[in-house]
Image (cartoon, rainbow, N blue to C red):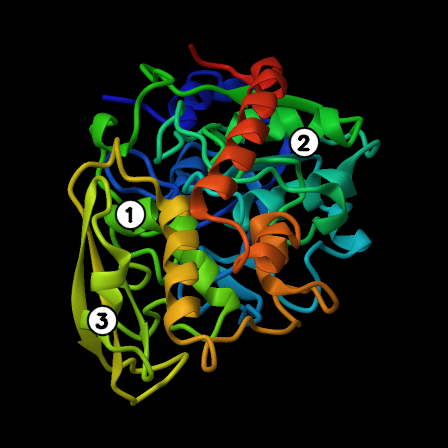
Amino acid sequence: MVYPGLYAFLEKIDKYRNAKFAVLSHQAACDLKYRFTVEVLLKHGLDIVAIFSPEHGFFSEVQDQKPVSDRTLWGLPVYSLYGKSLVPPDDLLDRFDTLLVDLVDIGTRYYTYIWTTVLLLKKLSKSGKKVIILDRANLLGGDFLEGPVLREDYFSFVGLLPLPVVHGMTFGELVKYAIDYYKLDIDIEIFPLRNYKRNMSFHDLGIDFIPPSPNMPHINTAFVYPGMCLLEATNISEGRGTTRPFEIFGAPFIDPFELVEHIGPVEGAVIRPYYFIPTFNKYRGRLCGGGFIHVYDFKKFRPFSFGVRLIKTIKSLYGEKFEFKKPPYEYEDEKMPFDILTGSDYIRKNIDIFSLEDFEREWEKEVEEFKNIRERYLIYA
């Protein structure tokens, strides 16, 4: 059994009895008995004066790219960090002296919870406030990396560090990287996982999966998300409005049997022809043809490579109907959504020119270079 950083913190909780806490967390951050971290801390007598919630809200009740309102829970104010602003106002910072962060991430660069944390850390730099990070495992595994490294001139709210799409780092390790990269002046303490090994993925942790966002309903979703999220930046449905988003994909103009035949065999997965009718989001109420991804070997399946392969195939078959979406997207008003997801304009501009193998060779070089940087921030062997 792998224990989240919450347990290491509880062993030293008496040290923090006199602090005034703000807690950045959400419903997926629980102890092993499914009790919310905020609730556990309150029962242990911590003085929590404010709660911050990330994208989707504390209970992951709000759909993607929708502003989240403030609310009240446990008699405490919950301030949204995904609404009018991505950071709290200055006067709110005066209410606490210690920030505690416990968030469940899914190991993909464009999942926004780590960037909410980074923006808050930048805001607190040189403030003299204490920051506590309760570490959580990387659900995709600590030794699985894939995809191009984000270029600095393509930074946005879906990426604020030079990371590959799948980075193989825990939340605490990402925070260490961010503090060094931005040269932040912060008194920080990271409480580590217990019994965690670098080669573990979700299936090795001995824990249940709690959906950290409304369209991440199952652990299988997390394993396809690094590639299928790219569809957000196109006019192809990523399956939002179905019960299995990101595993289901398509559009009204796609013949699912033709598409699956042209995709061909996929290592570690089977792609099944599929029809579906989304209840919201793209093509609401319209019949879409596409596919359903069934991953049977999580060690062999390469989600980002498959996502690029899928887009290349759809564009080659239905090029007159396929489109890359224009901004705005995730607080970015100028750069193309596909570019800030992939890390540059390189893949989009060359999607019809280079083969998938050409792209893979390029990002594999970038991943190898990144591993040397990553080594400085790793906490676990």
The residue sitting at the top extreme is 381
Q: Position of residue 93 (x, y in %)?
A: 75, 47
The residue sitting at the bottom extreme is 285
Residue beneath the point at 42% across and 19% down? 8
Quick check: 286 left or right of 155?
A: left
Residue beneath the point at 26% across and 61% down? 262
Q: Which residue is mark 1?
A: 210
Q: Position of residue 184 (x, y in %)?
A: 78, 29
Structural distance between the alpha carbons of marks 1 and 2: 26 Å
Structural distance between the alpha carbons of marks 1 and 3: 36 Å
Crowding at dot 1, Cα within 10 Å, few <14 / some 14-19 / many 20+, comes out as some
Of the residues shown, which amino acid type is indicated by label 3? Glu
Q: Which residue is mark 3?
A: 258
The mark lying in front, picked from 1 and 3, is 3
* The N terminus, quarter of image: top left
Asked which quadrant contains residue 128, the reply is: top right
- Of 70 and 248, nearer the camera is 248
Using the image, tell me which numbered label, if any, was put on residue 178: 2
Residues at circles 1 and 2 in contact by the CB criterion of under 8 Å: no
Crowding at dot 2, Cα within 10 Å, few <14 / some 14-19 / many 20+, comes out as many
The mark lying in front, picked from 2 and 3, is 3
Q: How many marks?
A: 3
* Mark 1 or mark 3, earlier in chain: 1
Of the residues shown, which amino acid type is indicated by label 2? Ala
The mark lying in front, picked from 1 and 2, is 2
